[in-house]
Image (spheres, grey):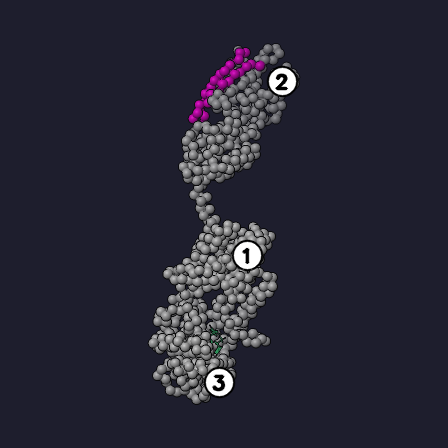
């Protein structure tokens, strides 16, 4: 806006200063300085020009209204430099008139259209300035903008316009608080959100505060005070209120409008974030609660452990796996829900308890109890609570619970607390389940030992430090060998052999049995083929191989068996696959499918340990089976005569179903005789031969080859 001459700045300013001196009689008196300083600050435009129409003084308001930042930009300039030509011409004419006539012009008004369409009215008064001789040497004037006399600054006008536009354009709520009057103007949306009927005109700010839920009014008042005091801060606050009984959360965001360093208004938006907050709450709930039971989950429990002190009761259902395996996942889920419900009712009775689920069949009860005796008592109460059966899909299901108890303090590492609870739980399980163990530091040694065992077993798998022992199975009638059962042994270097009970659970748990099982199949088939080459009496003897469920699911057992048979030149009928009824019961369709496939191709299937599991008779009809192996626990009962009727029924049933039978664990002549007399087809046990390494294996009874094919027996080839 300023012209070239105006931009020469300092030089002109100095010239103007001296001109002012001259105009005022040679000396700038103290009074004049004060007057000029005051004029700088008055809220209207004040200016002084020389006879050549050049500004020699312009106050702050004048500078600001022309968008100038420094006096230098206007001093020395003329109206033509800062106004549109028509307006500059009018002002020039007025100045000329004053110089010519020596008369002031008072309250001259001119109107201009503003950018936003509003007409601006400016009223100007101009006076001549004379030197000591009375000659007019300049003009002095002031202009006031009458459009909005209360407006303090251009900045405010601009923000006002911006606000008006925004309020119209947006569907958000807009609110505008006048600090001094405490009046608020709401646009229709903001009024709606805040439950107000009045909009677009001022309402008392307190009526809005009154509409908020308790506590929220204070928070909003504080937040507003903060931006007023510290206008650079942004206000951002969620407030809650009830509108027609509906809870609503409104997010308020606002900034201060500052004039001359002071906050005169607070202008902001209002948005309905009820649904958003609700969703966040839901997500938080989901993140901290268990889907199935709705109980607090591991994360929430860990947070509680970190926050307080008391006793953690770490619960693990003893029979969950069996329920899941025999009745299906749905029944398992139902059981978990049932347990959760009973635990919740316990927590409701004793309100200080927290109940949660760690996952699987593991639950937690947090009790603020002070002594471990109290915690143990609580464990007893829980055990009693869970001892009545759960009715699930028409069946009564009994479950017991093992509990690990550990004391925790807020200063403890929650992960460590959990580890100790787990160790105590392990101790309870090892002691026979259905009991509680309070953690003692010595238990860590046992746990470390278990950990160490796991590591050693892993190493054994890596190096295949295993061997197979072989036990004969003989015909009950002829006592001649019909098959050999391969039994797995762990051979840790430099240590005695270990039986399956020591390492099999770990192999199954970790599914490492899939790899080891493949080796068992291959090695036992290789051994049988080898024996057959060396010893003609083994020509028709079969190999009985134990397999676990995992081998079907991750090991592709059927393929492994067929491969081994091919590889070692055996036929499918040379192999018997032994699987326990528990494993079959928990089997996936995949397992049934592979069993059928094996059997279709001629491999025999034996159900191992029959009578100790929970299998139903229906399963016996459905499964592709050839052999029932009667568990050792029945054979033992022959000695005291307590097993007779049951074993007879099993033998009858097997005969009816066309299944062959093997009596396991035959140690005494009496057992062998009874089994034979009651129609059991095969015998197995220490009486007939112990499991031994391949090199020590002798065909029991006779060295003679069994050649005749028994009409009763498929095994008895
Ligand atoms: P199982 O299949 O019932 O094997 C028979 C178990 O009874 C063997 O125990 C055997 O040594 C033992 N036994 C045989 N005759 C008598 C007897 O007259 N009296 C007594 N008291 N015991 C006798 P072992 O070798 O400790 O095997 C235990 C279990 O480990 C087996 O029970 C079987 O379920 C499992 N197992 C063994 N080898 C393998 C394998 O290669 N793979 C899989 N998945 N499981 C295996
Ligand atoms: Ca077996
Ligand atoms: Ca068995």
Residue under numbered circle 2: 32
What numbered label is drawn on residue 375? 1
Query: Is 643 placed above or below 312 here?
Result: below
Q: Quadrant of residue 398?
A: bottom left
Question: Does label 2 or label 1 sit earlier along the sequence?
Answer: 2
Q: Quadrant of residue 407?
A: bottom right
- Cβ of mark 1 under 8 Å from ligand 1: the answer is no
Cα separation between marks 1 and 3: 58 Å
- Residue nearer the viewer, 253 or 58: 253
Question: Does label 2 or label 3 sit earlier along the sequence?
Answer: 2
Q: Closer to the observer: label 2 or label 3?
A: 3
Q: Could you tell me residue 430's position as x and y percent?
A: 53, 66
Q: Residues within 10 Å of mark 2 (few under 14, many from 20)?
A: few
Query: Is 705 placed above or below 34 here?
Result: below
Q: Which residue: 48% across, 51% down?
A: 349
Q: Could you tell me residue 278's position as x and y percent?
A: 44, 44
Q: Could you tell me residue 639's position as x and y percent?
A: 46, 79
**Can the viewer see residue 23 in this picture?**
yes
Residue under numbered circle 3: 698
Cα separation between marks 2 and 1: 91 Å
Q: Which residues are magenta?
A: 102-129
Q: Residues within 10 Å of mark 1 (few under 14, many from 20)?
A: many
């Amino acid at each position: 806006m300023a012209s070239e001459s105006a931009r020469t700045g300092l030089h002109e300013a100095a010239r103007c200063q001296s001109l002012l001196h001259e105009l005022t009689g040679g000396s700038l008196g103290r009074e004049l300085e004060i007057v000029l300083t005051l004029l700088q600050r008055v809220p209207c435009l004040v200016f002084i020009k020389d006879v050549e129409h050049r500004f020699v003084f312009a106050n702050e308001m004048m500078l600001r209204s022309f968008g100038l930042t420094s006096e230098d930009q206007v001093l020395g300039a003329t109206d033509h430099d800062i106004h549109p030509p028509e307006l500059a011409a009018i002002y020039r004419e007025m100045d000329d008139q004053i110089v010519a006539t020596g008369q002031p012009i008072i309250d001259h008004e001119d109107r201009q259209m503003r950018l936003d369409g509003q007409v601006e009215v400016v009223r100007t008064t101009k006076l001549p300035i004379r030197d000591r001789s009375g000659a007019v040497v300049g003009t002095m004037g002031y202009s006031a903008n009458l459009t909005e006399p209360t407006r303090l600054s251009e900045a405010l006008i601009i923000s006002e316009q911006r606000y008006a536009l925004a309020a119209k354009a947006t569907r958000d709520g807009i609110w505008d608080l006048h600090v001094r009057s405490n009046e608020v103007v709401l646009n229709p949306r903001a009024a709606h959100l805040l439950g107000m009927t009045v909009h677009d005109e001022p309402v008392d700010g307190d009526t809005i505060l009154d509409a908020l839920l308790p506590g929220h009014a204070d928070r909003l008042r504080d937040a507003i005070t903060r931006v007023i005091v510290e206008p650079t801060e942004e206000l951002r606050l969620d407030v809650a209120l009830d509108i027609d009984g509906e809870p609503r959360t409104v997010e308020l965001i606002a900034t201060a409008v500052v004039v001359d360093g002071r906050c005169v208004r607070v202008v902001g938006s209002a948005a309905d974030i009820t649904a958003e907050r609700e969703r966040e709450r839901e997500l938080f709930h989901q993140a901290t609660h268990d889907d199935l039971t709705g109980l607090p989950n591991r994360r929430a429990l860990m947070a509680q452990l970190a926050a307080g002190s008391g006793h953690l009761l770490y619960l693990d259902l003893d029979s969950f796996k069996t329920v899941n395996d025999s009745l299906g996942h749905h029944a398992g889920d139902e059981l978990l829900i049932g347990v959760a419900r009973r635990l919740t009712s316990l927590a409701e009775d004793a309100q200080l308890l927290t109940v949660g689920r760690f996952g699987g069949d593991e639950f937690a009860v947090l009790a603020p109890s002070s002594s471990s005796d109290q915690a143990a008592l609580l464990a007893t109460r829980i055990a009693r609570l869970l001892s009545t059966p759960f009715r699930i899909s028409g069946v009564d299901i009994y479950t017991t619970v093992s509990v690990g108890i550990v004391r925790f303090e807020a200063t403890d590492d929650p992960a460590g607390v959990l580890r100790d609870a787990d160790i105590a739980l392990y101790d309870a399980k090892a002691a026979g389940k259905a009991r509680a163990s309070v953690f003692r530091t010595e238990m860590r040694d046992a746990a470390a030992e278990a950990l160490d065992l796991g590591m050693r077993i892993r190493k054994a798998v890596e190096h295949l430090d295993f061997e197979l022992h072989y036990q004969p199975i003989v015909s009950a009638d002829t006592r001649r060998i019909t098959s050999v059962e391969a039994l797995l042994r762990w051979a840790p270097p430099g240590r005695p052999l270990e039986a399956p009970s020591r390492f099999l659970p770990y192999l199954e748990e970790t599914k490492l049995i899939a790899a080891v099982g493949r080796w068992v199949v291959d090695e036992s088939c290789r051994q049988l083929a080898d024996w057959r080459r060396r010893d003609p009496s083994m020509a028709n003897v079969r190999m009985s191989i134990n397999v676990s469920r995992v081998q079907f699911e991750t090991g592709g057992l059927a393929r492994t068996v067929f491969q081994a048979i091919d590889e070692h030149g055996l036929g499918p009928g040379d192999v018997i696959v032994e699987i326990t009824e528990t494993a079959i019961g928990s089997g996936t369709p995949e397992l049934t499918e592979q069993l059928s496939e094996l059997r279709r191709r001629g491999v025999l299937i034996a159900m191992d340990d029959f009578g100790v599991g929970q299998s139903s008779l229906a399963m016996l009809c459905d499964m592709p089976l050839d052999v029932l192996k009667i568990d050792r626990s029945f054979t033992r009962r022959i000695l005291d005569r307590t097993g007779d009727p049951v074993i007879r029924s099993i033998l009858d049933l097997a005969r009816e179903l066309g299944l062959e039978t093997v009596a396991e664990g035959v140690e005494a002549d009496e057992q062998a005789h009874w089994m034979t007399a009651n129609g059991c087809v095969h015998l197995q046990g220490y009486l007939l031969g112990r499991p031994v390494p391949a090199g020590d294996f002798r065909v029991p009874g006779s060295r003679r080859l069994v050649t005749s094919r028994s009409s009763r027996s498929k095994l008895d080839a």
